[in-house]
Amino acid sequence: MSKPKPPVRSAASVRGLLAHRRGKRAERLAKWWLRLSGYRVLCQNFKTPVGEIDLIATRGGVLCFIEVKVRSNMDAAINAISTGQRARIERAAEYFLKKHPRLSDQDIRFDAFVSSGGIRGKLLKDAWRPGW
């Protein structure tokens, strides 16, 4: 009996899979970096009906909603967070605060962790201000 052949994947689906893996690797890097920098990571990949937040962390009375981006270079990663994506993250943050009212007394900040795919990354504190 012959072995079943693996499914044939299109080039686009392979690129998508590789991008997904790079993103997950960047999230692990960001989580590691945050912990080493004194942050307490509360959630990773917090999914809501209105959007998803990559990381949620606290440090010194500040609640941070963090979007992780990995691109071929740091400038591209910084510019990869669109206005629509920011709005979705803000709506997801509101949802999170309704579910966790004990955290609503903390200062809130929207950060971005950017990486060019290696073992280096950078946290951009206060990357944007919400339109609340």
Image (cartoon, rainbow, N blue to C red):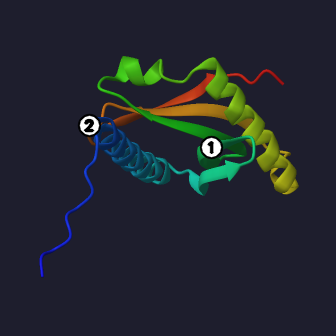
Quickly name the residue at label 2.
Answer: 11
Residue at left 66%, top 22%?
Answer: 84
Residue under label 1? 53
- Name which quarter of the figure residue 114 lies in: top left
- Identify which residue, 49 or 52, lies in the foreground: 49
The 10 Å Cα crowd at callout 2, few under 14, some 14 to 19, many 20 or more, is few
Rendered location of residue 83, percent (x, y): 64, 18
Query: Of callouts 2 and 1, which one flags the residue occurring earlier in the amino acid sequence?
Result: 2
Which residue appears at 31% of the width and 23% of the height? 73
Is 97 on the left or on the right of 109, as rendered?
Answer: right
Residue 92 x, y percent position in the rendering: 73, 41
Mark 1: amino acid: Ile
* Label 2–label 1 contact, CB within 8 A: no
Q: Residue visible at 65% across and 41% down? A: 64
Residue 35 image point, x, y percent:
48, 54
Q: Residue at x 26, y 39 (%)?
A: 118
Are there few (<14), some (14-19), or many (20+) residues within 10 Å of tag 1? many
